[in-house]
Image: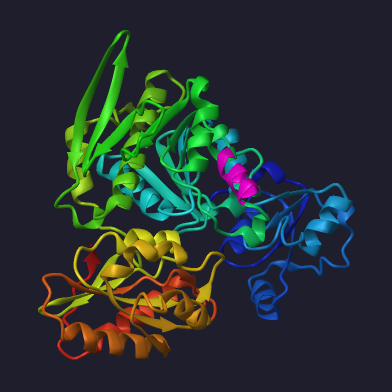
Amino acid sequence: MIRAMTFAGKTVAVFGLGGSGVAAAQSLVAGGADVAVWDDGVAAREAAAASGFKVVDLSSADWTTFAALILAPGVPLTHPEPHWTVVKAREAGVEVIGDVELFCRARAMVAPKSAFIAITGTNGKSTTTALIAHLLRELGFDTQMGGNIGKAILTLEPPAQDRVYVVEMSSYQIDLTPSVHPSVGVLLNVTPDHLDRHGTIEHYASVKERLVSAADAAVVAIDDKWTGQVAARLEDSGRLYPITVGRGAVLVPRLYAIGSSLFVHEKSGSYATSEEVVQLDGIPSLRGAHNVQNALAALGALRALQELADRGEVELTVNGVPHRIWDIERIAQALKSFPGLAHRMEQVGQTDQVLFINDSKATNADSTDKALASFQGDIYWIAGGRAKSGGITSLAPHFGRIRRAYLIGEAEDAFAQTLEGQVDYVRCGSLEAAVTAAAHDAGLERGCETVVLFSPACASFDQFRNFEERGDAFRRIVEMLPGVSKSRGTV
């Protein structure tokens, strides 16, 4: 656990007692702070009291006694309106921060030259975070991964010069981290998402930009409008590492792809060279154009980190001994052993002719677009849940390869209207009914690559608590189908 010693001897309020909130409270207590916790949920308050925390009703507390409010990232900071705790904090002149801010302050105090890679983007950030962490571990580094993926950041091992931190950051977390200053910031893409919490895409994009603008080195994918604009603003900073999958970008990239081959572009004086790092064909966990970008971003982060180390801005050591991170042969081997992520293009079962793919993490149309683009054969597509703005109209270029769609959840009616006359569809209501129907229909197909793809393009909250629970349910249903063998792994 990381101790938040920067608030030693002070009183701090914590609102929101999920995983990150509880970890923040524990960290603050361990660091010597007096902590008052609260949550709108009775069960969460009771659990906190049973764990020994001081539960204080923040609605009637004296806010002038607090040095800070630690806000859970799921609680509105600005839109659709600030949470009541935020209003009270601002009225009392109390700073509002999150758990990642506590980490940043602890790192700055204890090990400011420890390597810290922060990854953001609308889509792909979890895969990229996991891939970077995997590469670093395979290269021999003590690698701590957390944030918006896996562990709450304050549950990681304490900052130390020998440790490398790989942290996924959502826009909510960036908003609550005013002193964020990663060694390497990675920005993958920006598409409309979470606009209920940011108001406009311009504000949403500006939050994402703040992460890379504050970094010692900025790895920015330059293939969409918003990230291209961010890169252009950073072009003269000397800190930019543009990456592209080859869509006619204006800036000269440091890393780029031709098909599934990844290259690094080096310039020395008037000479420039390009060197192939790896060919992604044959790596099942990195299938699809979206994973080409994810892999480029991971390579960009490692290249940037090595150059920071060469300049003495970060320390890359193993057991106290300087250790190079940029080793193309070892990186290529490590890429081939990447296992992928659960719930993201995860193969959970198969018959002689049908693959069952769990892509429950696809909570918006842009993410589902990448999943649909990854298969050449017939697709039996299960979609639906709680729809996000924009629906699935952007997926129209893929409609010709969808043999049938199986609609579930609150989005059934809206998705049916979009598909009408373009894709054969069935209203199934429940996930179980959809899987059963899709498996039956796909079993009648004799194509060379037939896929039952669960890529909802929706949030899960109408029927499930989160996408993990939704994905686990899909896997269990598939494994109960007759003739299906389990085949865990990412495609």
Spot occupied by residue 100 in the image (x, y as percentages of width and height):
58, 48
Task: Tell me, yes or no, if residue 308 can be seen here.
Answer: yes
Residue 435 drawn in magenta: no
User: Residue pushed farthest top?
Assistant: 270
> Along the horizontal axis of the image, is 486 left or right of 309?
left
Residue in the foreground of this view, choosing between 64 and 471: 471
> Along the horizontal axis of the image, is 12 left or right of 230?
right
> Along the horizontal axis of the image, is 400 left or right of 78?
left
Residue in the foreground of this view, choosing between 313 and 329: 329
Q: Tell me if residue 189 comes above or below residue 161 in the rendering.
A: below
Q: Tell me if residue 236 comes above or below residue 378 in the rendering.
A: above
Q: Tell me if residue 5 comes above or below residue 442 in the rendering.
A: above
Q: Residue at x 64, y 76 (%)?
A: 47
Spot occupied by residue 358 in the image (x, y as percentages of width and height):
32, 72
Residues in magenta?
201-209
Spot occupied by residue 433 in the image (x, y as percentages of width and height):
36, 91
Task: Tell me, yes or no, if residue 320 can be seen here.
Answer: no
Residue in the foreground of this view, choosing between 433 and 463: 433
Q: Residue at x 28, y 25 (%)?
A: 265
